[in-house]
Image (cartoon, grey):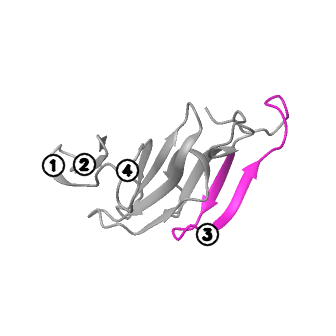
Amino acid sequence: MLDAGRIKKFASDGTFLTEWGSHGTGDGQFDRPARIAADSAGGVWVTDGVDPSYYLGTSRIQHFPGDGTFLAKWSELSVAVDITPGATGDPLLADRGTPVGSPDPPSVGRVQKLLGDGTLLAMWDAAGRPSTPGACWAT
């Protein structure tokens, strides 16, 4: 659960387990957390740092094990919209395809499949307008 720049972890019965993070832009801190996902190994993935209304900020993904210890971050991103673990536990990231800070409106979105270390495995996108067959637009 994201709450005021912190992640709070609960057991399936609602028992509070732990929390971590604070407001900020450093490792393990959250500026504008948007989406959170947990993988089957208990890892936590957080998209953070962008105001999607204005495309400003420092878009990044942060990765933590279940205990909240900072593992890694990826910050060479477009506007990160959503994240979910794939079948292997590696993240699938949906983004708007427009570089952070760009004055341009969102371009064709894309889905990126990453390894747990941030290595890009595959990307699905299409150049063109929303009516172009195969175009993937973020919402």
Q: Amino acid at mark 2?
A: Lys
Instruction: Check disc 4 and report its element: helix, strand or loop.
Output: loop
Q: Which residue is mark 3?
A: 119
- Which residue is pictured at 21% across the width and 50% down the height? 11
| Left or right side of 9 for 121 | right
Question: Which quadrant, please, contains the N terminus?
Answer: top left
Q: Residue 73: image x %, image y %?
A: 48, 63
- Closer to the chain start, of discs 1 and 2, is 2
Q: Are marks 1 and 2 in contact (CB under 8 Å)?
A: yes
- Vertical comparison of 54 with 59: above or below: above
| Residue 89 lies within the magenta run | no
- The span shown in magenta is 110-132
Answer few, some or many: residues within 10 Å of disc 3's Cα (few below 14, many 20 plus, some between 14 and 19). Answer: few
Amino acid carrying mark 1 in the image? Phe
Residue ID for mark 1: 16
Mark 2 burial class by Cα count in 10 Å: few <14, some 14-19, many 20+ = some
Sequence order check, earlier mark of 2 and 4: 2
Q: Residue at x 78, y 38 (%)?
A: 135
